[in-house]
Image (cartoon, helix red, strand yellow):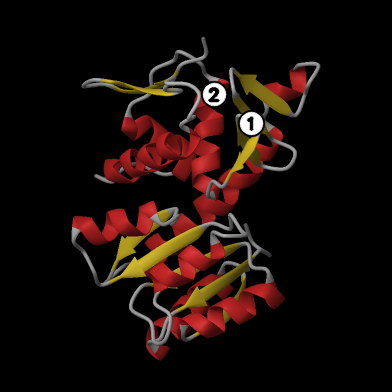
Amino acid sequence: MPGNKVMVVEDELEIRNLLKLYLNKKGYHVVLAEDGNEALRLFEYEQPDLIILDILLPQLNGYQVCQELRKYSNVPILFISCKKDSEDIIQGLHLGGDDYITKPFDPNVLVARVEAKLRRAPIFRRTSTFQETPKKDVLTCGNLEINLSNYQVLVDGNPIPLSAKEFQLLFFLAQHPDQVFTSEDLYKKIWGYDCAGDVRTVMTHVSNIRKKIKSSHSNKEFIKNIRGIGYKFDGE
């Protein structure tokens, strides 16, 4: 959303300045970093609302920066990279990235993705069926607890670290128990734009969530794969 702060972490001066120009035109405040160490230092001071993160960076690379940030923050992270192999994309998503766009890219498309991500976050804060229940900020299903007030997920009473998109995806599915959604549906609902072939983003995020919320005391799968169709949250 205009007025939000976006950090661009990119070692190529031309790309940094290009992204700053396009984001400034849309009303965003832009913070620039040219290597991984600088990104981590600036993050503590600037507290950006979203990070555009290149992978091939001097010192700490983008993967390492993402891993470090995910220890204490669920800030949305959009990877940009010339690395186009599926393995590279999946690795970025597994490490906690929320999306991935390859170079060369259309700056207008990238800005649209930034807008979509920042637009979706307030929606998940406002539209909550939890607020219609006595325990209005908490949804409990068996040993799984989703707390909307502090964006915390507990399994067996233990906190589970989820990225912003992982939390939003789990929250959305939990809001619609036993309703089946295709990967395309989920991509559009959570990421805010048409899928355009990026169903692997959804698949990777679902896989991440399943691993993180799996309990050592229960074999229950909260997110079930409906073969050939999509996914649903098992609310029973």
**Residue underneath mark 2:** 174
The image shows residue 88 at horizontal and vertical percentages of 25, 61
* Three-letter amino acid code at the position of disc 1: Ile
**Numbered circle sitting on residue 136:** none
Q: Which residue does the numbered mark 1 point to in the structure image?
A: 146
The answer to whether any part of residue 192 appears in the image is no
Asked if the residues shown at circle 2 and circle 1 are in contact, with their CB atoms under 8 angstroms apart, the answer is yes
Measured as percent of width and height from the top left, residue 24 is found at 58, 74
Hey, which residue is sitting farthest bottom in the picture?
A: 13
Note whether 120 is above or below 220 in the view shown. below
Image coords of residue 136 (percent x, y): 77, 24
In the figure, 102 relative to 56: above or below? above
Amino acid type of the residue that numbered disc 2 sits on in the rendered structure:
Ala
Residue 223 drawn above or below residue 66: above
Residue 183 locus on image (x, y percent) = 33, 32
The residue depicted at 47 percent of the width and 80 percent of the height is 36
In the image, 60: left or right of 184? right
Quadrant where the N terminus is found in the figure: bottom right
Q: Earlier in the sequence, mark 2 or mark 1?
A: 1
Q: Quadrant of residue 120?
A: top right
The correct choice, above or below, for 186 with respect to 44 in the image is: above
